[in-house]
Image (tube, rainbow, N blue to C red):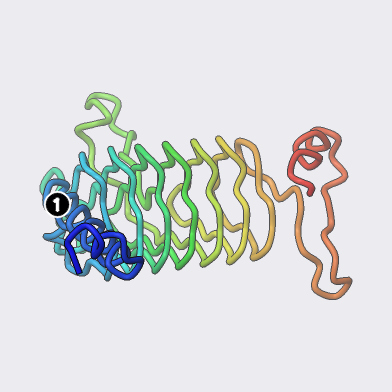
Amino acid sequence: MSAALALDCPAVKQRVQLLRERAFRLQANRRSGAHRLSALGRESVVVPPATILSPHRIQIGDRVLVFGNATFSVVEEYRGHRYAPRLRIGDETIIGQGVWFSCVGEIDVGAQVLIGHGVLVSDSFHEYADRGVPIMHQPMAEPRPVRVGGGAILGPGVAILAGTTIGEGSYVAANSVVAGEVPPHAVAAGNPAEIIRRWDTERAEWIDSPDERWRALLGALTS
């Protein structure tokens, strides 16, 4: 069989494609610094450029895709304070461009989560009590764990603040600011975020907020 005929063979084409994808992942992960992570699962890729602090404290599962300009600000020391941060991202999660993880404690993102562009996920904040010191030079507040359940969606521009838990299969609408808990299989929206739709297991149906402010948004999110 000639080389030209061999390249036309579907099995050969598939093999070549797989090799190209593998080469792309290897190159991308090296350029972004993801190859230095504590764990980087099979077929996962962090597209450069990326900012990765404390890579040995970051674990990424299998078949995860992180688009470019992500920031993994995982901080072990700040202004004389030592921390033991841990950031975990589950299998098959997709993370949009410009996402910022700010972690001095624990952030746990489940499997098959979709995170939109420009999302902030943070388990702490800069203290601001000392009026004589610029806030950026003040210590970080005591971290509180952040958890995003499997199958959830965080829309573009969402901010997830310290101590927040997003339940499995929940939908957080774009530009929402969440501090607290979103139950499983619920829709949250707003600043501060409110639960505007939830799944009632006893009635086996979706229950909408009666607040008229959310009518248009709920209409847009109804198939």
Q: Position of residue 197 (x, y in %)?
A: 76, 52
Q: Residue at x 74, y 44 (%)?
A: 221
State which quadrant residue 42 falls in. bottom left
Mark 1 residue type: Gln
Q: Is residue 7 left or right of residue 199?
A: left
Q: Position of residue 40 (x, y in %)?
A: 23, 66
Q: Residue at x 75, y 58 (%)?
A: 198
Q: Closest to the observer: 55 or 5?
A: 5
Q: What residue would you read off at disc 1? A: 27
Q: Is residue 111 visible?
A: yes
Q: Position of residue 222 (x, y in %)?
A: 79, 47
Q: Position of residue 127 (x, y in %)?
A: 31, 39
Outermost bottom residue: 202
Q: Residue at x 79, y 49 (%)?
A: 223
Q: Closest to the observer: 124 or 22?
A: 22
Q: Secondary structure at mark 1?
A: helix
State which quadrant residue 62 falls in. bottom left
Q: Is residue 144 left or right of residue 177?
A: left
Instruction: Name the quarter where the N terminus is drawn.
Output: bottom left
